[in-house]
Structures are given as structure tokens and as C-alpha cells.
Image (cartoon, rainbow, N blue to C red):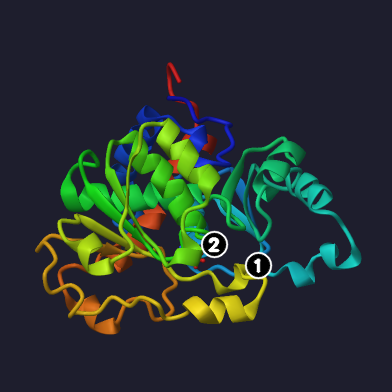
Amino acid sequence: MSLHGRDLVSIRDLSREEIEEILAASRKMIPYAEGSKVSHSLADKIVAMAFFEPSTRTRLSFESAVHRLGGSCVTIADASVTSMRKGESLHDTIRMLSSYADAIVIRHPSEGSARLAARASDRPVLNAGDGAGQHPTQTLLDLATMQEAFDTLSGLRVVLLGDLKYGRTVHSLAHALSLFGSEIVLCAPPSLELPEPARARLKQMGAKLVDEPNLTRAIRDADVLYVTRIQKERFGDEAEYRKVAGSYRIDASVLKDAKPRLAVMHPLPRAGEIAPEVDDTPHAVYFRQAFLAVPVRMALLDAILGSPRKGG
Ligand code: CP
């Protein structure tokens, strides 16, 4: 594998073998992410964080990953304090950043913005979420979490619950799960089902897709329950959001007949979809999932920006 100098705009930019190599490198990064080992692999590197949408985990875990590798960050955490307020385009903003940093991590509300940024930049661009499009680095840490829980990614039965229309994490994750032969159970309110183009692409890959709108039936026999937040900010009409708000909630009673090893995941933030009582059950892996963002993003940044490997 050589990810050196490459963009990561979509999870489709990675083969199964490349994903496996990133996951193997991520496992080795855990002691560095915890601070018990020290790395200087990005000592001379600057990574720009260009966040034009709110973020806690993605931006801060990327920043933590850069610092843990001995690098530095320059950060836009709030578009309203940039010259975009004066009318500067995203293209020009990214082009400038590419002369101030060695790589750019971008989050933006418009689908396709990360692809535009990659074209504007002569430095690697990593998509940290483009509207309802993709969130490929989230997928890598989601896979790392499943692999840690089950020692494998093959043959898992994974329920994707919630906002499958606007949820970019599930758009990326469904593709990756298909590469590993997992069974994907789609459980969504009727107006938030997986869009047809995404479904068609998955079917073309030979994905094992099952529609099961009934949550109790979906959870039965599941290995992973991947819960998502309804993406309120992507609804054009508040009334449409209100029709589906609160339509599912995972609590202890919902999980009572689940497999003992069912892993409940969530990219977070949650907004009521998982009751706090679930945090204390052995099913809850979402905070571990959030931690694994750091070693996974370290492994990715090291592969893209670190010294090229021999034969890479
Ligand atoms: N999972 C995720 O993307 O979280 P943030 O929106 O807090 O970055």
C-alpha cells in the first residue's frame, strides 16, 4: 500500500487491502494515542484543519493525532472569522491553505466540497464530512471498533439504524462493510431510507442488504447496532424533521433480547437516540469508538505524510 501523498475524499478511494493495512497500523498506534509511547513522525509537518461545520470529535481527534505524532496544526474552527465572510470562495481558501500546510482536513456542509478542495489543493486533502455525502475517516474508526470487538470484520450482521438518508457516516460505512462481506440491515423511518443511488451502488458490489424497519426484529441476531442521530441540520423544512424526531430510542428494554455480545455503536454526538442507562451495559462501545479516532487518524496521517515506506 502507498497512501503517501494521497487524498482521502471517499471511502471508495481505498481498497479492502488498504483499509486492512490502515487498521493494522492503527492497532500499533494505540499506545502512542494513549501517550505511553512517543512518536515524532510528523515533526516537520503542519496539518490544516478547515472546519466549516461544527465538530467535537473529528477536529479534536485529528488535532490530537497530529500532536501525538509531533506535528503542528493551523485551524479554522469557525468559518465566520475567515475571509470567506468577505466573499472569498472555498476554492481560494483551500488554495491558500495548501501553501500554509502539508495536508488539509476539511469539513463542509456541501456534498462534493471535499472533492472541490482536493482539486484546489496540491497537498493531500482528507474529507472530514461533506454534507450528507461521505465521512471516510469515521468509517475507518468504526471498522477499527468492530474489529476490536469481534476480531474480524467478515460475516458480521450490522444494523444501520436511523437517518440513512442524510447520515454521511452510514453512506461511507455501508460501502466498507460490503467490501468485508458483512450483512447490512437497514432500519430507518420511511422518509429517511437509504437513497436509491447509494442502494444501487451497494447492490452492484454484491452487498448483502436487508430492509427491516422493525427495530426489535432488526436487533435480533445482530452483532452490531450502529445508531445514528437524525441530521436535523440537513432538513429543508423543520416540519419534516418534527415528523421523525424521536422515532427511535435505544434503552435497556430494547436490548433485553439482544445477543450478549451485541456492540452498540454511534458516531456521536447523540441527541436522545441512546438512553444514558445503556452506557453502563457491556453493549456500549461508542466511547471506545470515539477514542479509537485518535490511533486511526494517527495511522492515516502517518501513512499520508510520514516518511514513505520502502517499496511503498
Ligand atoms: N463523529 C463525528 O463526526 O463527530 P463530530 O461531529 O463531533 O466531529
Q: Residues within 10 Å of mark 2 (few under 14, many from 20)?
A: many
Q: Indicate the position of residue 95 as horizontal and vertical percent values.
A: 79, 44
* Alpha carbon separation for disc pair 2 and 1: 8 Å
Position of residue 278 relative to residue 84, above or below, is below
Considering the image in quadrants, where does the C terminus appear? Answer: top left
Q: Can residue 41 be spotted in the picture?
A: no
Position of residue 222 relative to residue 122, above or below, is below
Q: Secondary structure at mark 2?
A: helix
Q: Is mark 2 within 8 Å of ligand 1?
A: yes
Front residue of 21 and 71: 21
Relative side of 110 to 192, left or right: right
Q: Secondary structure at mark 1?
A: loop
Relative side of 39 to 128, left or right: left
Q: Which residue is mark 1?
A: 77
Residue depicted at 37% across the width and 51% down the height? 141
Q: Which mark is residue 59?
A: 2
Residue depicted at 31% across the width and 66% down the height? 286
Residue depicted at 12% across the width and 74% down the height? 256
Which amino acid does the dot numbered 1 rest on? Ala
Q: Can residue 125 be spotted in the picture?
A: yes
Front residue of 175 and 56: 175
Position of residue 63 relative to residue 229, above or below, is above
Which amino acid does the dot numbered 2 rest on? Arg
The image quarter containing residue 120 is top right
Relative side of 209 to 133, left or right: left
